[in-house]
Amino acid sequence: MKYFEKQLDNNGSYAKFYLQEPNQEIDSDRLYPSLVICPGGAYFWTSFREDESVALRFLAEGFHVIVVHYATEGLERMASDDVEQLPANPVSAFPQPLVALAKAVAYLKENAVSFHVDLNYVVVGGFSAGGHVASQLGTHWHKPWFQELLGKDMELYRPTHLLLAYAAYALDADTDSGSFDKVTFAATGCTHPSQELIEKLNTIANVSPHTPPSFVWHTMEDSLVPASNALKYCQALDEVNVSYELHIFNKGKHGLVLGDLRTGINESNQNAQVYKWVDLFLEWLAPIKTNRFSFHKPQKG
């Protein structure tokens, strides 16, 4: 494995690259599927629980894995519920996390030959708030305003597939009432964001035929992000004939990650149903279902 980190902007965003290395004993010309992950953390921080353990799980399945730590202010600076005590112009404000993610994907694709990247499988995924960022890339990658912002060929940051785990798809903001929501502030930099900005950050409303095929999972007992949002997102995909697979597990809290004690010390972090999501995702993504490592075609002999 080759490991390195790359700075993505001047705000503190960086990406961790875990890359497979071809070997002549197996196949010196092998190309690898890639998973670009965005951890969650309510736009306050990026969670370690949704970082290295997930990367190692997918490395074991033969993926390149890139973990994008988009810039955040950190839990300590976002602890107060008094807006006057919060940082002005938070680095987590849109579109900065989205731009950081797009830059990481573009860097991977720009180096596809030397990194042995299978360009048919450049999956962008995320958990919770990170799923919101991933779904933003999935719904905005083709838009001229975003290309102008990045200054790159849009094909360089186009995801081939999305992996959305208990993702947020919209912000819980009521612009009419004028109420203050701290997560919305972290995601927008505004105490009272405009309706136009709220609509841009509603990725359900921005689903189009350009949105990549999506694997979506959620839990019915999620008290932080309603499972109904996952249903609405998949319904929007269905309406524009974009393929998807949706799993809503009956039991389980928000933030289960891998569904075992690798990603949480409490008994409630163990869930035998949710634990299966990685295998379900692989069977959805692979060209030959139930055949492990079917990204690679066997040679006769």
Image (spheres, grey):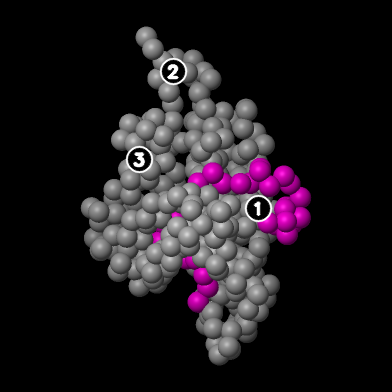
Q: Residue at x 68, y 47 (%)?
A: 154
**Quadrant showing the C terminus:** top left
Q: Is residue 158 above or below residue 137?
A: above
What is the number of the mark on residue 283? 3
SS of the residue under disc 3: helix
SS of the residue under disc 1: loop
What is the number of the mark on residue 26? 2
Q: Name the quadrant containing residue 189.
A: bottom right
Residue 37 among magenta residues: no
Q: Amino acid at mark 1?
A: His
Foreground mark, 2 or 1, reads 1
Q: Residue at x 29, y 54 (%)?
A: 274
Q: Amino acid at mark 2?
A: Ile
Residue 167 at what x, y percent from top left? 45, 62
Q: Is there any visible trace of residue 116 in the rendered image?
A: yes
Tag 3 or tag 2, which sits nearer the N-term?
Answer: 2
What is the number of the mark on residue 142? 1
Q: Is there any visible trace of residue 133 in the rendered image?
A: no
Q: Is residue 217 above or below residue 228?
A: above
Q: Name the quadrant containing residue 299.
A: top left
Q: Is residue 273 above or below residue 293?
A: below
Residue at the extreme bottom of the image, as rendered: 177
Residues in magenta, as a range? 143-172
Residue 202 at what x, y percent from top left? 55, 68
The foreground one among 282 and 100 is 282
- What is the C-alpha distance between the residues marked 2 and 1? 37 Å
Tag 1 or tag 2, which sits nearer the N-term?
Answer: 2
